[in-house]
Amino acid sequence: MDAIQKEMLAKIADLHEVPQGAYNFRINGEGAGRNTTENIDIVTKTDKPGIDIIIKPGTKKESVHIPVVLSATGLNEMVYNDFYIGDGADVVIVAGCGIHNSGDEKSEHDGIHTFFVGKGAKVKYIEKHYGEGDGKGERVLNPQTIVHLEEDSYLEMDTVQIKGVDSTVRTTRGDLKARAKLIIREKIMTHGNQYAKTDFEVDLDGEDCGCDVVSRSVAKGDSFQEYFSKINGNARCTGHTECDAILMENGKVSAAPMLTANDLDASLIHEAAIGKIAGEQLIKLMTLGLTEEEAEAQIVNGFLR
């Protein structure tokens, strides 16, 4: 890997050296390093681009890193990654994609990640998206996440996109069995003429299952964001979806949360708040010696923390 690729890995996966445990690096459409462990296997698919990550039942305190970097302009790829998490496992999975485009052609990475989370298993999934480069070519990322949660399982998704991606459509689908829990925390910032869309839908099928989805976003410049979410309560369950957005300059945000209760004991809540930074917040920070620009940056950083 060259210096740019190493720098991108640090930004999207906090990797400054080869990680401990299982990992698979994908650089410009090709494998660039892999390690498996006694409990975690990574297998290249034979029918389409992508990998299978197989985690044995009962695996504890292990991690998997699967970052992707594109540093060649004009590269467009689609990958399919499937995660099989055995019953009772407790693991951390770190993904993410970084695009460095210094050319005039569009660079695009689309990925479909499908999770099969076994009974009683617990997964923390971290995904960062980042773009940079001084070329005129677009940086496009379209991640799809499909989640199947078995009884008593737990999946927490922490997704971040705060710089440099010109266009993204982030699609999530899920179905939950009894007592399963899905937690999603999304953070997005757009600027210039960028576009970002979140499209989330989950079926709460099992008794006492639940999901909690919170999206925080900042739209700057002439950027536009759309947020769609739908929770289907098909049993006694709990569901919450929230979109909280800050507008700056000429930014625009559209939010459309939807709830469907198909069971008498489904308890579902949605919230949406869109607005500019309050003037009193700016004034308070500016009285402490910050410029207006510095005060705005402090507020945004705190909001997206």
Image (cartoon, grey):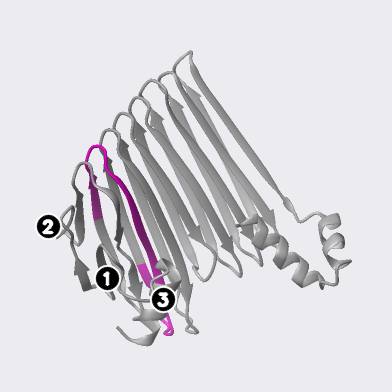
SS under mark 2 = loop
Q: Earlier in the sequence, mark 1 or mark 3?
A: 3
| Vertical side of 93 occupied by 86: above or below | above
Query: Label 2 belongs to which residue?
Result: 47
In front of the other: 270 or 199: 270
Under mark 3, the amino acid is: Met
Would you identify the image quadrant in which residue 32 lies? bottom left
| Lateral position of residue 188 relative to residue 85, left or right | right
x, y (%) of residue 104? 43, 83
Residue wearing tag 3: 8
| Other residues around mark 2 within 10 Å, as few (<14) / some (14–19) / many (≥20) | few
Q: Splitting the image into 4 quarters, where does residue 10 fall?
A: bottom left
Q: Main secondary structure of the magenta part?
A: strand
Q: Which residue is located at x 71 percent, y 65 percent?
A: 298
Mark 1 residue type: Arg
Q: Position of residue 81 (x, y in %)?
A: 25, 55
Q: Residue furthest top?
A: 264
